[in-house]
């Protein structure tokens, strides 16, 4: 999983987008994915009561309105809205690139910068 936080800067009406790391996933159930997201947000000391939105690609375990991650998080944060993420193709591209060790090493070095 490649979570990205999108938020407005308080100094100006500028939208920031920050990549917050690679998270290895072994259990792709919506409950586990929601817990992984909440755990990462907790590690970053984010107040999830201030979350107003979430965006994922359209897979049922992420976007399902009955049992997807968006529904799991909506139970805890009722005021947030789900928005389909059109940049999912970037996620798929990164997943494929990371399967090649030489590219994975370069990306890991870039993240450390």
Image (cartoon, rainbow, N blue to C red):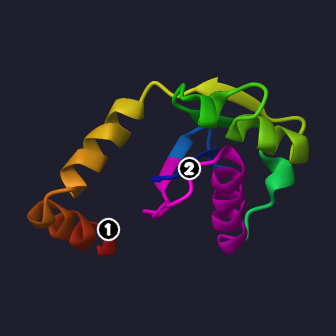
Residue 13 in the figure: left or right of residue 104: right
Above or below, comparing residue 112 to residue 39 in the picture: below
Above or below, comparing residue 97 to residue 63 in the picture: below
Q: Quadrant of residue 109?
A: bottom left
Q: Which mark is residue 111?
A: 1
Q: Secondary structure at mark 1?
A: helix
Q: Which residues are magenta?
A: 17-44
Task: Pick whichever, 10 or 33, lies toward us.
Answer: 33
Q: Which mark is residue 28?
A: 2
Residue 64 lies, in percent from the top left, at 68, 27
Residue 74 in the figure: left or right of residue 12: right
Q: Residue at x 68, y 63 (%)?
A: 41
Task: Pick whichever, 32 or 38, lies toward us.
Answer: 32
Above or below, comparing residue 56 to residue 44 in the picture: above
Circle 2 packing at 10 Å, graded few (<14), some (14-19), many (20+), is few
Tell whether position 25 is magenta: yes
Residue 38 lies, in percent from the top left, at 72, 59
Residue 81 in the figure: left or right of residue 9: right
Q: Residue at x 80, y 60 (%)?
A: 47
Tell whether position 95 is magenta: no
């Amino acid at each position: 999983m490649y979570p990205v936080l999108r938020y407005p800067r308080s100094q100006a009406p500028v939208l920031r987008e920050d990549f917050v790391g690679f998270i290895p996933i072994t259990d792709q159930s919506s409950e586990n994915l929601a817990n992984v997201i909440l755990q990462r947000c907790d590690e970053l000391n984010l107040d999830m009561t201030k979350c107003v939105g979430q965006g994922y690609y359209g897979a049922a375990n992420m976007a399902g309105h009955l049992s997807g991650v968006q529904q799991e998080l909506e139970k805890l944060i009722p005021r947030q809205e789900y928005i389909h993420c059109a940049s999912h193709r970037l996620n798929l591209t990164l997943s494929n690139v990371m399967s090649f060790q030489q590219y994975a090493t370069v990306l890991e070095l870039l993240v450390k910068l």
